[in-house]
Image: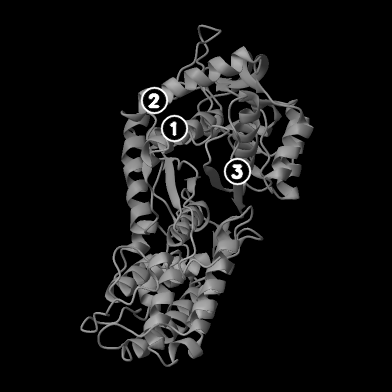
């Protein structure tokens, strides 16, 4: 089937749900380079193809790290969540990460909808004997009357020994009970810990073989299925539903002096269902995208640190729900690092999305192209300053930019002649390669970029007779749109196209606006990039004796 030559393409509905960001700080490139960029690239390619994707995400307002940030800033959790939640939306927009709805569960109009979904889900799961009460040992600080759970609890991972905060390990993706933490200690020096037995709510998970078969059918890699298997073995086929937190959506408490709130990792199940309902309203389908017969392809993108919350709390719980399909695809990425080290908000080892997006010299397309070149599905990757500068200058400014200039100078006056059949065939095949890279159980943004690069390097198309330069530029806009949307839209519109690039409109012989300048890329200096780097990477802090 050709998307370019008039073959019928029946548009399909998609719902993409990247993770809810915790509103305790702005976004950095470590956040953006994985799940958010993935969802945006997938959605843009689907729109090029003629499909109907919607991206819905939101703010994980009830995370304990919001309360931690409020303590550090002498503020309230609600104020912190509102302030950084808006900053997160601004950061996504700055890097052209498209979001069709941003759900904020503690603010209207979302609060009532979220609370209704939580109540309805718990009622249904309780009726299906999926909610159980368990006794557990939880640390408590009598001096501050603080339940030391979530981000307030530190120690070492019981599986790999790495340092941890809260209930999970970013190194090995393990999740565990507070009593399983090795060498537990409070984040704050507020007094000694005592261990108290309390009752908490958990969800009874389906048989492990049923869950594993479901994950295998979803194409989840063996290494992540093994992580789930270890979690189920240790925690007895249950996943936490409540936690003794004062900041959160309250649940009925069993003990008068012990708060009980919805555990955020359980809340992402209800969040997903709410996103499905919002999709039904925005898309006009009128059904929840997670209804078994909705006809909507549902996709979530996530980092390795969210393997258990997603594969257990969402996929596992959906099997218990009884009237809900799980996500059709769970796309997992490895960590994106900065100069070989983990991006860290607390250590200020980060390139902030807003800072690099605001740079007058760098350009959002350059950042996106560089990030998309990493193959995070297969392995971790790292932002390296020298490599970024080579990409910005040699690959884009001196490479693709000059090719665009040369093609622009050969644009025809008036409508172009039809494209050469070989050019149409090549573009069709490269669009199919992008579909294979972005629309499947595994995602490779690197392969999507490689398809774009092959078209950019094809002199036979650009220099062909019959106005090859025009058709090369127009094909560039289709293949570049998932990666470099600003460039793609400018090229498309200056060739006479309307709105966003669309494969179905490729063959329209619209006259180019030859009087307008060719889009391109400026060169980026080391000083331009240094202005966006954290102090941990600035040249003056790396010299021997600097800041001594």
Q: Which mark is residue 277?
A: 1
In the image, residue 526 sits, relative to residue 138, either above or below, namely below
Mark-to-mark CA distance, 1 and 2? 10 Å
Q: CA distance from mark 3 to mark 1?
A: 16 Å
Disc 2 and disc 3: Cα gap in Å?
24 Å
Residue denoted by label 3: 328
Secondary structure state at the residue bearing disc 1: helix
Residue 467 location in percent, x, y?
37, 88
In x, y percent, where is residue 289?
50, 36
Q: Residues within 10 Å of mark 3 (few under 14, many from 20)?
A: many
- Is any atom of residue 340 visible in this view? no
Of callouts 3 and 1, the N-terminal one: 1
Which residue is depicted at the point 33% across and 57% down?
94
Q: Which residue, given by chain and number where applicable, does mark 2 sit on?
A: 113
What kind of element bears circle 3?
loop
Left or right: where 402 falls relative to 157:
left
């Amino acid at each position: 089937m050709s998307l370019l030559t008039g073959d019928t393409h029946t548009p399909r509905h998609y719902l993409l749900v990247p993770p809810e960001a915790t509103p305790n700080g702005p976004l950095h490139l470590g956040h953006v380079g994985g799940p958010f960029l993935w969802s945006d690239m997938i959605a843009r390619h689907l729109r090029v193809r003629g499909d109907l994707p919607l991206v819905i995400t939101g703010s994980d307002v009830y995370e304990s790290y919001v309360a931690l940030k409020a303590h550090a800033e002498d503020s309230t959790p609600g104020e912190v969540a509102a302030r950084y939640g808006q900053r997160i939306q601004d950061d996504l927009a700055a890097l052209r990460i498209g979001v069709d709805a941003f759900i904020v569960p503690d603010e209207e109009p979302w609060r009532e909808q979220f609370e209704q979904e939580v109540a309805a889900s718990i009622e249904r799961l309780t009726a299906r004997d999926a909610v159980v009460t368990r006794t557990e040992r939880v640390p408590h600080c009598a001096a501050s009357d603080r339940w030391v759970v979530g981000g307030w609890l530190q120690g070492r991972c019981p599986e790999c020994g790495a340092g941890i905060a809260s209930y999970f390990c970013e190194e090995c993706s393990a999740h565990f009970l507070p009593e399983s933490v090795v060498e537990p200690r409070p984040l704050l020096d507020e007094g000694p810990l005592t261990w108290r037995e309390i009752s908490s709510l958990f969800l009874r998970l389906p048989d492990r073989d049923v869950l594993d078969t479901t994950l295998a059918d979803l194409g989840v890699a063996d290494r992540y299925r093994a992580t789930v298997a270890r979690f189920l073995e240790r925690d007895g086929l249950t996943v936490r539903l409540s936690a003794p937190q004062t900041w959160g959506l309250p649940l009925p408490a069993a003990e008068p002096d012990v708060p009980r709130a919805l555990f955020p990792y359980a809340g992402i199940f209800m969040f997903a269902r709410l996103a499905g309902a919002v999709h039904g309203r925005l898309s006009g389908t009128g059904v929840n995208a997670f209804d078994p017969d909705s006809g909507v392809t549902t996709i979530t993108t996530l980092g390795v640190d969210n393997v258990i919350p997603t594969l257990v709390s969402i996929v596992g719980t959906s099997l218990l729900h009884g009237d809900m399909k799980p996500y059709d695809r769970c796309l997992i990425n490895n960590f994106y690092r900065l100069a070989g080290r983990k991006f860290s908000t607390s250590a200020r080892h980060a390139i902030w999305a807003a800072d690099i997006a605001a740079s007058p010299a760098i350009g959002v397309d350059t950042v996106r192209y560089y990030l998309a070149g990493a193959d995070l599905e297969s392995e971790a990757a790292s932002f390296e300053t020298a490599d970024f500068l080579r990409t910005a200058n040699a690959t884009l400014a001196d490479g693709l930019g000059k090719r665009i200039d040369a093609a622009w100078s050969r644009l025809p006056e008036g409508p172009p002649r039809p494209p050469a059949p070989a050019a149409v065939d090549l573009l069709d095949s490269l669009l199919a390669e992008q579909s294979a890279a972005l629309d499947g159980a595994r995602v490779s943004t690197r392969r999507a970029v490689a398809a774009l690069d092959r078209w950019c390097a094809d002199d036979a198309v650009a220099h062909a007779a019959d106005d090859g330069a025009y058709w090369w530029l127009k094909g560039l806009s289709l293949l570049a749109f998932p990666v470099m949307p600003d460039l793609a839209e400018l090229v498309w519109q200056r060739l006479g196209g309307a709105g966003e690039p669309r494969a179905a409109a490729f063959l329209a012989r619209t006259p180019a606006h030859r009087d307008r300048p060719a889009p391109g890329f400026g060169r980026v200096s080391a000083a331009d990039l240094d202005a966006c780097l954290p102090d941990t990477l600035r040249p003056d802090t790396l010299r021997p004796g600097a800041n001594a």
